[in-house]
């Protein structure tokens, strides 16, 4: 059995779908050729949120003591950076019999650890847990563009700061596919992977890709740093706002570099932002 936390999120939902159709090899803990049992965990989840045959369990990573039911009988865990007690979460997993953990972290844990202390703490806890582990450091995700969905639907308009600064945003489907490989295969134990898309794209180019997917123009407006800060501060801690704006506006060479890790794990190039936009055009229509 594999437990997927954050199972209703952009990565978790895709991962649950992939695992539900997978077969486990002997190293995944379920006998070769047998279907993978999947438990999908989120704070608010019902059977209607998951594919047939997947067990849906409500659970909150902020409450490790309440995770026993979710983790019971599992051999592997896909873990988000959530809550404030990674050691408590991992202890609960070990008591339930989990032997392998795949952590979805942030690229910022490697490039700006002084800002991204939360994922750094989770990474340190996972590496020191005594479990088999893999850490996935995701770059910015293509689904960040869903923040534009309402303005594109209603006004065919998109706004963002630093309109001509490019970053290699990654498709969450690729993140999920790498996570599935790390959960099912033994070749990725002890690895830390950085996950990016195939090429840097700028906010202006991403708006153009959405326009192409819709077959209609989308007007792009560049926000000032101050405007972006004001909006982000409504739902992010201020240090994270500052770090995020620094990445978006003054990325390091490493943050702009295309990582080979998706292709290394999956044997194919990562999907482009344009392909993601085409697949998700309905969200903007």
Image (spheres, grey):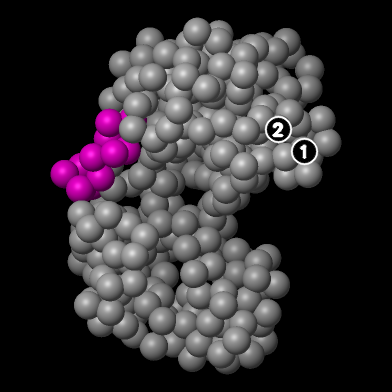
Horizontal side, residue 66 vs residue 200: left or right: right
Relative depth, front residue between 107 and 91: 91
In percent of the image, x 68 and y 79: which residue is there? 285
Work out whether residue 284 can be spotted.
yes
Badge 1 or badge 2: first in the primary sequence: 1
Question: In the rendered picture of this protein, how many numbered marks are placed on residues?
Answer: 2
User: In the displayed image of the protein, which residue is found farthest to the left?
Assistant: 114
User: In the displayed image of the protein, which residue is found farthest to the right?
Assistant: 52
Q: Is residue 96 above or below residue 118?
A: above
Crowd rating for badge 2 (residues with CA inside 10 Å; few <14, some 14–19, many 20+): many
Q: Is residue 249 above or below residue 152?
A: above
Give the residues in magenta.
Answer: 110-122
In percent of the image, x 44 and y 42: which residue is there? 261
Q: Secondary structure at mark 2?
A: strand
Q: Is residue 195 above or below residue 141?
A: above
Relative depth, front residue between 260 and 90: 90
Which numbered dot is residue 47? Answer: 1
In which quadrant is the N terminus drawn? Answer: top right
Image location (x, y in percent) of residue 120: 27, 35
Which numbered dot is residue 56? Answer: 2
Relative depth, front residue between 25 and 235: 235
In percent of the image, x 55 and y 10: which residue is there? 96
Image location (x, y in percent) of residue 150: 57, 77
Q: Give yes or no for contact between labels 1 and 2 (Cβ–Cβ under 8 Å).
A: yes
Q: In which image quadrant can residue 86 be found? A: top left
Image location (x, y in percent) of residue 169: 44, 60
Give the CA separation, mark 1 to mark 2: 6 Å
Relative depth, front residue between 246 and 192: 246
């Amino acid at each position: 059995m594999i437990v997927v936390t954050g199972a209703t999120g952009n990565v978790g939902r895709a991962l649950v779908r992939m695992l539900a159709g997978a077969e486990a090899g002997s190293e995944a803990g379920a006998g070769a050729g047998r279907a993978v049992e999947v438990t999908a965990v989120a704070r608010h989840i019902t059977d209607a949120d998951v594919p047939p045959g997947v067990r849906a369990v409500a659970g909150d990573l902020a409450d490790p003591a309440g995770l026993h039911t979710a983790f019971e009988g599992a051999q592997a865990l896909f873990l988000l950076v959530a809550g404030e007690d990674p050691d408590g979460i991992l202890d609960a997993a070990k008591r339930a019999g989990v032997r392998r953990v795949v952590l979805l972290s942030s690229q910022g844990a490697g490039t700006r650890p002084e800002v991204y202390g939360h994922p750094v703490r989770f990474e340190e806890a996972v590496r020191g847990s005594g479990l088999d582990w893999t850490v996935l450091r995701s770059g910015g995700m293509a689904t960040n563009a869903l923040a534009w969905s309402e303005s594109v639907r209603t006004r065919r308009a998109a706004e963002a700061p630093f309109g001509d600064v490019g970053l290699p945003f990654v498709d969450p489907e690729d993140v999920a596919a790498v996570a599935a490989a790390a959960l099912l295969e033994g070749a990725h134990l002890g690895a830390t992977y950085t996950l990016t898309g195939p090429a840097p794209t700028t906010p202006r180019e991403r708006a153009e890709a959405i326009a192409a997917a819709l077959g209609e123009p989308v007007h792009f407006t560049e926000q000032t740093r101050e405007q972006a800060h004001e909006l982000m501060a409504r739902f992010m801690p201020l240090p994270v706002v500052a770090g995020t704006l620094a990445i978006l506006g003054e990325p390091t060479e490493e943050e702009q570099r295309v990582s080979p890790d998706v292709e290394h794990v999956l044997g194919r190039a990562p999907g482009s932002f344009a392909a993601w936009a085409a697949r998700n055009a309905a969200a903007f229509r």
